[in-house]
Image: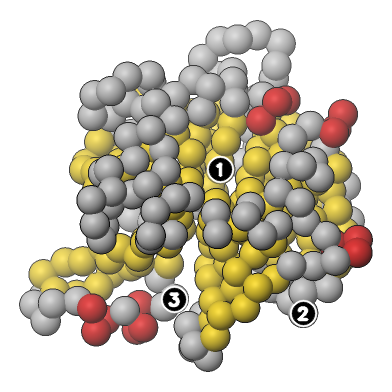
Amino acid sequence: MKPYGITSHKHKIYICDTGIGGLEILDLEKKSFEYFVPVGMGQLQFPLNCAVDKEGFLYVADGNRRQVVVFNEQGKFVNAITLRDQKKPTDVQVQGSKIMISALDDHSIHVYNKVDFEFETSFPSQESKDEHHLYQPANITLGDSLVYISDIGACRVMTYSPEGTYRFSFGGPGKDFGQFTRPKGIATDREGNIYVVDAAFENVQIFNSGGQLLMNFGGIYKGKGGMWLPADIAIDYENIEFFIPFVESGFRLMHLIYVTNQYGPDKVSVYGFIEAK
C-alpha cells in the first residue's frame, strides 16, 4: 500500500507498510507473501522502519506508538521500548548486544541493551549546535566501525563511532551532485560504499567510505528503475541466486539493492550491483 522501511534476513524480505499498519514478509525460498499485522500488545500504528537480528527477532520503529516494538522469530510480541520523554523513533538497527534507535525530535541516537532492553546512553551531546549536532536524524545504518545517520534536518550524512564519537560528515543542502534535499534511507555494502536515498531528488547516490560521490541511480519515475517518493534502502548478499536469471550473461551479480517507493506502480524496486565476468 505505502511501503517505507525495508530489510532482509536470510531468505526473507521485511517491508514496513504505513498503509496497513503492519508489514509484508516475502519469503524468496518458499515463494510466499504474507501480511504481518499483529494485534494486542504488539499492534502497530505507523511502522516506519525495521531491523532483524541474528536470532530472527524483529524490531519495528513505530512513529505513532512512539515505541520500538519487538517480536520473536515466530512473530510473538516480546517487548516495547519507549524512548525518554516519549520521543519519536524513526529507525532502529541492532548490532551485537546493542539496539540503536534514531530519535527525530530528540536530535540523537538512543542506545539500549538487547538483553534486558534497558537504556544505556545517547549521542551526540545536545549542549551545542556545532558540527557534531544532529538536527533531525531520519535513518541509520551500522558498518563495521561506524554508525551512519541521514540527517534530514541538515541535509547531510553524519558518522560516529559505535561509542558515539563524531568522525566526519558529508553532503549538505543543495541540488548539485553530492548534496541532498530530503535524505532518508541509508545503507552500506561490504566495500564500505554508502548508499543514500533522497526523497526529493527521487534517486540514490553512492559515496565511497570517505564520503566522495561515486555515482547515482534512479530518478523521477518514467518506468522500471525510476523512483516515486523513495523512502528506504537495503543491501542484500544472501539472495543473489534468486535474481541471477535477470542478469545478462556477461555480468556477475555481486549484491542486491532494494528501494521502497511510497507511490507509483513499483512499490519495491530491486537493483543489481554487477561486474563484468
Provide residue 122's location: percent of width, then percent of height.
74, 32
228, 210: nearer the viewer:
228
Q: Amino acid at mark 3?
A: Glu
N-terminal-most mark, 2 or 1: 2
Disc 1 target residue: 140
Disc 3 target residue: 238
Residue at 28% across, 23% down: 175
Provide residue 161's location: percent of width, then percent of height.
57, 37
In the displayed structure image, the side of residue 80 where residue 162 appears, left or right: left
Q: Which mark is residue 74?
A: 2
N-terminal-most mark, 3 or 2: 2
Can you tell which of label 3 and label 2 is closer to the viewer? 2
18 in relation to 147, above or below: below
Quadrant for the N terminus, please: bottom right
Residue at 74% across, 35% down: 88
Residue at 76% across, 42% down: 64
C-alpha separation, residue under disc 2 versus residue under disc 1: 26 Å
1, 120: nearer the viewer:
1
Given the current orientation, which residue lies at the most extreme bottom position? 30
Q: Amino acid at mark 2?
A: Gln
N-terminal-most mark, 1 or 3: 1
Q: Secondary structure at mark 1?
A: strand
Q: Amino acid at mark 1?
A: Ile
